[in-house]
Structure formats: structure tokens, C-alpha cells
Image: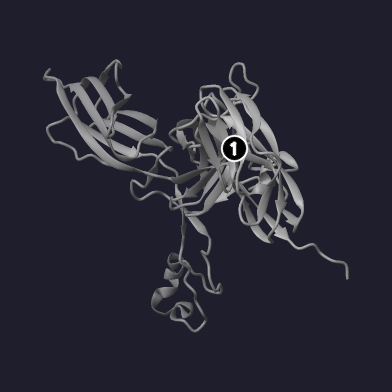
Amino acid sequence: MDAPREKEHLLSLKVMRLTKPSFVLSCPVICEQQDIFSRGSDGLQDLLPKLGSVQGLPAVALGELLTLPQNFGSIYLGETFSCYVSVHNDSSQIVKDILVKTDLQTSSQRLALSGSGATPRPELEPEGCIDEVIQHEVKELGTHILVCAVNYNPPSGDSMYFRKFFKFQVLKPLDVKTKFYSTEQLPMRMRAALQSDEVYLEAQIQNITQSPMCIEKVSLEPAPEYTVTELNLQPDDSDSSIFGAITYVNPMDTRQYLYRLQAKPQQGSERGTFTKGVSSIGKLDIVWKTNLGERGRLQTSPLQRVSPGCGDIKLVVLQIPDSITLQSSFKFLCKLTSCCERTMDLKLNLQKAGTGLSWMGISGKQLGKLGPGDSLQIELSMLSTIPGLQSISGLRIIDQNLKRTYEHDDIAQIFVHHAQTAA
């Protein structure tokens, strides 16, 4: 980035971005014995090394070569922007009180990078220069403008001032998608081994740059109300990632990460519960390196989870068999959790369970009082009457204080099959 020099000023300003070289694949020139290049006619033999081929070798220069950047290049969010600022005295006179100031203007703010509050340099001899390296971690997307201002006093005594603008774009390096799962969304056979108040976060991270990268760390920094367990490690080694020692991600490739979240117990309660409505879970912290070791870091905004509405009472099936034989009874275990801020006096009513199942037991059983955030477990029995995949319905919970009925249908499914007879 060379700023055009203005003739009326004694000083000139140059700005150059500092970046590492890139790999370029050269195109080989294949040469055979009957080709004109191999016969050396008309002095073309001297041109062979310049074209990347040597007589006797079918192909050379098949590897990647390091090439210095030819333009400003791409800058990605989370990387460190480095530039070299040079002010040169092109005149034959001594310039005094030189102050160089650089700012970075984004769409939302103006950041002072250097020179703010600094002491001016007393003088600058002819052909002398003031050099400075500036580094800044970019944290915003979009257009950035580097503003370089120079203030000095020429021999005439009148203060002189000029500034130059250098515009560049900051691009998005990663595409991060997240999705939350509660235990109610998991298959029934998995729920017995899990706690009903657990939430799982799936993070999909895609490399949308034009070069490969090595992801060093992907961690979830939870909000103070939650604890997190990383599920991206080998089951036999808690320190080994499932992706191996090096997570190498090519352009447009995606890696998936899974985390388990649990709410911390509230004061006076043994177990925590997730709050209803919208809650902040935490932030994802991602650290990567490019193919030449340039480091980048990206932290997402707070992840918001919308808790599914469960009303005043939350019902979860803890244990249930996968299948049963026809005309046999079975038991399953349920858990009731209060999600309201009042004490309820509950009663259990059993209505028609469906076409292929029938309730066993007494309807109208008193369950007792249930305080805010408290839970209780109930065991229920049923009889299978029709084969096939049957849905359990007809469970009614009545709050006797407010005379309010909570209906629970299609709470679980069970497969009913004929008993196998011996041959």
C-alpha cells in the first residue's frame, strides 16, 4: 500500500501490510527428446531453466513454492492485522517535531493504534525515516479504514499536516451453527441413563476461507448458572480428541462438536433446573492456525436457548421397556416436576389409554403436595391388548387447589408383539 506523494510536503508516507508468504503450485513443462526444446535449436536450450523444465527430466517443479504476497490479500475476523508504517524525509532540509498517528476506523468505532499521546520526534535529517510496526486483532466484520496522519514543522516554521487513508475488508473465516437438544428429544431407550434436566449443544464449525486451517481448540465457556462437560474426547482417553492429535480442516469442510450442559443447584435445592423462556448458555471459543502458523481466535456472541414450554408441570418418562408380548402387563416410571412458583396439591386420573393399551390400577390416586421446583416419581402399570406400535395416552394430573387439569397424551410408545412359540 503506497500512498501517493504530495509535492507540497517534505515528507512521504508508505504503508505495507506484513504477512507471511503463501504456497503456489507451479505448472511443470514436460519435454520429450523430439521436442524443439530438447534439440537446442535456435538457442532455446538456454530458455529451458526459465520455463521450469530440464533436458532429461520428464517433469520438474511439481511441488509447492513459497511466493511473497502480490497484493493486500485477505484478512479474516479473529486474525492479527500487521502493517509497516514508514515516514521518509525526501527533502534536503531538517524537519522538526514529527508526530505520526495511526487510527483504525470501523463501522462502529474508531480505534487509536499508535501516536496518541506520544512525544513528537525532535527532528528528522534528510533521507531519514521513522519506521513503526503496528499490530491489531480485528474483531469486526466489514470495511476497515487505516488512517495515517503526519504532523511536522518545516524550516519555514509553519506547522504542516497531512493524512492518508487505506481501506480493506475483514472477512468471515468460520461459519458456526448451533443446535440445542433436551433429553425429551432423544430416543426413549437413551433417556433412562440420562438426567431429565440435561441439555446438549451441537456446534457445527465450517472453514469458509480459501486455505486449510488447523483448529487448536474449540471450548464452551458456560454462563455462571451452568456447568459443561465436553463430549468430544476418546472414551478410553480423556485427553485425546476424537479428531486425532491434529484437527486439519480443508476449505468448506465441517467439524461437529458436542457438549452437555447442566444447571447448577439453586440455594436450598439439591439439583438445578433450566429456567423457562430465553436463557444465555455461554460462548464458544475457537482458536486456529493457518498452514503457515498464523494464529486466529474467534469468540461467538452469547448463545441463546429458548426452553420448550412445559406449562406448570413437566412430565418425563424415566424407564419403560422397548417391547412387550401381547396380553401381558408392564410397568413404567414417570417423573413430575413443578415449573411454577406455587405449591400444588396433585391427584392422578387415568382415562382411556388408546386402542391397544389399558390402564391397570386405581384412578383418582392422591399424589400429595408438590412445591416450586420439586419433583416426584410415580410408577404406572398397563396391559397390552392389540399388537403393533402403541402410544401411551390418557394421563391426567389435577391441581386440587385451582381445580386445574393437566393433560398428557402420547407421552411414550411401546411395541406389542405376539409371544414366540417353541418349534
Quarter occupied by residue 82: top left
Model colouring? one colour
Residue 274 visible within the image: yes
Quarter occupied by residue 91: top left
Residue at the spot 45% in from the left edge and 70% down from the top edge: 48
Q: Is residue 420 left or right of residue 156?
A: right
Residue 90 visible within the image: no
143 lies above or below 131: below
Task: Give x and y (percent) for residue 76.
Answer: 40, 42
Q: Is residue 216 left or right of residue 26?
A: right
87 lies above or below 170: above
Residue at the spot 65% in from the left edge and 22% down from the top edge: 270
249 lies above or below 282: below
Q: Is residue 135 left or right of residue 102?
A: right
Q: In the current view of this chain or complex, which residue is farthest to the right?
A: 423
How many neighbours does mark 1 have within 10 angstroms: few (below 14), some (14-19), or many (20 or more)? some
Who is closer to the viewer here, 181 or 333? 333
Who is closer to the viewer here, 196 or 295? 196
Task: Give x and y (percent) for residue 422.
Answer: 88, 67
Task: Give x and y (percent) for residue 79.
Answer: 43, 38
Who is closer to the viewer here, 109 or 242? 242
Indicate the quadrant containing the C terminus: top left, top right, bottom left or bottom right. Answer: bottom right
Indicate the quadrant containing the N terminus: top left, top right, bottom left or bottom right. Answer: top left
Who is closer to the viewer here, 340 or 79? 340
Badge 1 element: strand
Task: Give x and y (percent) for residue 140.
Answer: 35, 36
Q: Is residue 214 left or right of residue 190?
A: left
Under mark 1, the amino acid is: Leu
Quarter occupied by residue 155: top left
281 lies above or below 189: above
Residue at the spot 58% in from the left edge and 25% down from the top edge: 345
For label 1, the residue is 315
